[in-house]
Image (cartoon, rainbow, N blue to C red):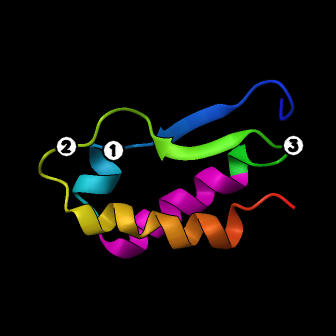
Amino acid sequence: MGERLFIKGNMNAVEMLTYTTPEQVIAHATERIRIGAPGGGYILSTACSVSPRMEPWKLELLTPLAEEIGRYD
């Protein structure tokens, strides 16, 4: 894909971002990046809208993780 198409999402916003620990959120996001990133064109994002019950700091965990391991050189 990479040059012309992209895949966005694949984070389970209901279960993984609402009912889990920070460690589980990071592990889930890391797995999604490792699966989606090879070849380029992957954008880490939720698969749909986020629950109003989700604690906002869980989304804030994703930015440094994406910057660290989700970067294309």
Taking the image as shown, residue 20 lies to the left or right of residue 31, namely left
The image quadrant that residue 43 belongs to is: top right
Residues in magenta, as a range: 21-34
Q: Is mark 2 on a helix, strand or loop?
A: loop
**Amino acid tagged 1:** Ala
Figure check: 20 above or below 49? below
Q: Is mark 1 on a helix, strand or loop?
A: loop
Taking the image as shown, residue 30 lies to the left or right of residue 21, namely right
Name the N-terminal-most of marks 1 and 3: 1
Q: Is the residue marked by circle 3 packed among few (<14), some (14-19), or many (20+) residues within 10 Å? A: few
Query: In front here: 14 or 71?
Result: 71
| Residue 39 x/y as whole percent | 87, 43
Q: Tell whether label 2 touches label 1 (CB within 8 Å).
A: yes
Figure check: 30 above or below 16? below
Query: In front here: 30 or 72?
Result: 72
Residue at the image position 54 percent from the left and 73 percent from the top: 64
Q: Tell whether label 3 touches label 2 (CB within 8 Å).
A: no
Figure check: 70 above or below 46? below
Spatial distance from mark 2 to mark 3, Cα to Cα?
31 Å
Name the N-terminal-most of marks 2 and 3: 3
Residue at the image position 83 percent from the left and 29 percent from the top: 1
Residue at the image position 69 percent from the left and 68 percent from the top: 69
| Residue 20 x/y as whole percent | 28, 63
Disc number placed over residue 43 in the picture, else none: none
Residue at the image position 87 percent from the left and 61 percent from the top: 73
Question: Would you name the residue on which mark 2 appears?
Answer: 51
Disc number placed over residue 13 in the picture, else none: 1
Question: Would you name the residue on which mark 3 appears?
Answer: 39
Does residue 27 belong to the magenta stretch? yes
Q: Is the residue marked by circle 1 packed among few (<14), some (14-19), or many (20+) residues within 10 Å? A: many
